[in-house]
Each structure stands twice: as C-alpha cells, then as structure tokens.
Amino acid sequence: MNPSILYIHGLNSSPASTKASQLLKVAEHCGIAQHLRVPALHHHPRQAMQQLQAAIAELGRPLLVGSSLGGYYSTFLAEQHGLSALLINPAVRPHRLFGGKEVEQTNYYTNETWLLTHDHVAALQELEVAEPRDAARYHVWLQTADETLDYRQAEAFYAGCSLDIQQGGDHSYQGFARRIPEILALAGFAPALWADFDFSTL
C-alpha cells in the first residue's frame, strides 16, 4: 500500500491555511500530491467526519496530520481505524471549551459565517475517546505559547505518546515548514523525494 497523508485542518480553517498550503506545495514538488488529501471540512462535526471517513476509505491507511480541532478529529479516527497520527497543538475535549452559548463564527479563509449550536457541541462530545491505547502510534507537537489552547492539556492527555514540546511559538505552530520532511518520513515516503527542495522558501 502506498504511503499517504490526510491533513485535517482546525476550526474555521481551510486548505488555504499556511500549514496546509505548505504541505500541498511540497507534495506537488515531490510528485506525491495524489497521495495527499486536504479536505475543506464542513463546520459541523458529523458532516466533517463523513468527509474524513471517505478520505480514509480512498487512501487506505494514511498518516493523519491534525491541527487544533483537526487533532481531536485525528485522535478519534486513529483510535477507530488503528492509524498513526501526528497532532499539532491539538484540541483536547473541545466540547468543554464552549460556554453553553450559541455563537456566530466566521471562517478565517472563506469568510463563511455560521452558527455554532448546541448540536455542534453534542457532536463533538460524541467523538471523545480515552487516552490513546497504543501510544506508539502518536506523535504530538506542542508549542508552549499557544494563545488559543493550553498546551498542558494535550501534554497530560498524550503523556504516554511521543511528545515534542517547544518553548514559545503560537497556535499556528511556528517553524512548521522546516518539519515537513519529518511528516513525510513518518508517512513512509522516501527522503530522496525532497532532497532537492529548499524548505526555507516556504
């Protein structure tokens, strides 16, 4: 089975986000774009999950790369399918972060506005899983100056996993581009594919 990657963006994000765009650019250069999926996820968790399940069925056994809320989705899917996952500043139990109010949201990239409802929160709660059973399948990258999520929650939840905690940074994960080779290697791609790529240009 060919190596593949399913990149899962966060809340109010899109394939146009910086990390997704950088990953897509590298995949195109390496000639592996057909083995990468970066779906534009629906804001409702149940519909987003349908999109992600379809992508997994198409790819086979992809490495899940999840950012923020995408990290939460990735954990559910990794547990369900026995997949490996790389989580970048992942959300932990995001349904507990909303204060019980229905709040209008705006997608940062598409300018779509939508209402975060109690049903969204209930759907997020349905995806909650226990701490990973097979910690060896998880790599978790955290930056301590994440302004959106408290990195210590992820540090505790994924305590048995491979944790990479960097001081500083932010929620978007500073320095992501230079770590793309690690992602490709985790997925199983041959290093020769990106040997001539200058990651400093991203």
Image (tube, grey):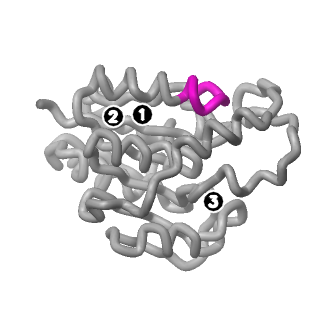
Point out the frontmost of discs 1 and 3. 3
On the image, numbered disc 1 is attached to which residue?
A: 24
Q: Amino acid at mark 3?
A: His
Depth check, front residue: 52 or 176: 52
- Please state, as top left, top right, bottom left or bottom right, where the N terminus lies in the image: top left
Q: Are marks 2 and 1 in contact (CB under 8 Å)?
A: yes
Taking the spot 48% from the left edge, 23% from the top edge, the residue there is: 50
Q: Residue at x 77, y 51 (%)?
A: 98
Does 42 appear in magenta? Answer: yes
User: Which of the two marks, 3 or 2, is nearer to us in this view?
Assistant: 3
Query: Which residue corresponds to mark 2?
Result: 27
Q: Nearer the viewer, residue 32 or 150?
A: 150
Quarter assignment of residue 54: top left
Q: Position of residue 107 (x, y in %)?
A: 74, 33
Q: Could you tell me residue 64's position as x and y percent?
A: 36, 43
Q: Give the magenta part as a residue range.
A: 41-48
Classify residue 158 by image quadrant: bottom left
Q: Give the mark nearest the N terminus, 3 or 2.
A: 2
Where is residue 113 shown, x and y percent of the image? 82, 27
Distance, label 2 to label 1, CA atoms, is: 5 Å
Label 1 packing within 10 angstroms: few (<14), some (14-19), many (20+): many
- Residue 171 disc label: 3
Classify 10 Å Cα crowding around label 3: few (below 14), some (14-19), many (20 and above). many
Coordinates of residue 18 in the picture (x, y in percent): 57, 43
Q: Nearer the viewer, residue 157 or 23?
A: 157
Identify whether 15 is placed above or below 182.
above
Q: CA distance from mark 1 to mark 3?
A: 20 Å
Q: Secondary structure at mark 2?
A: helix
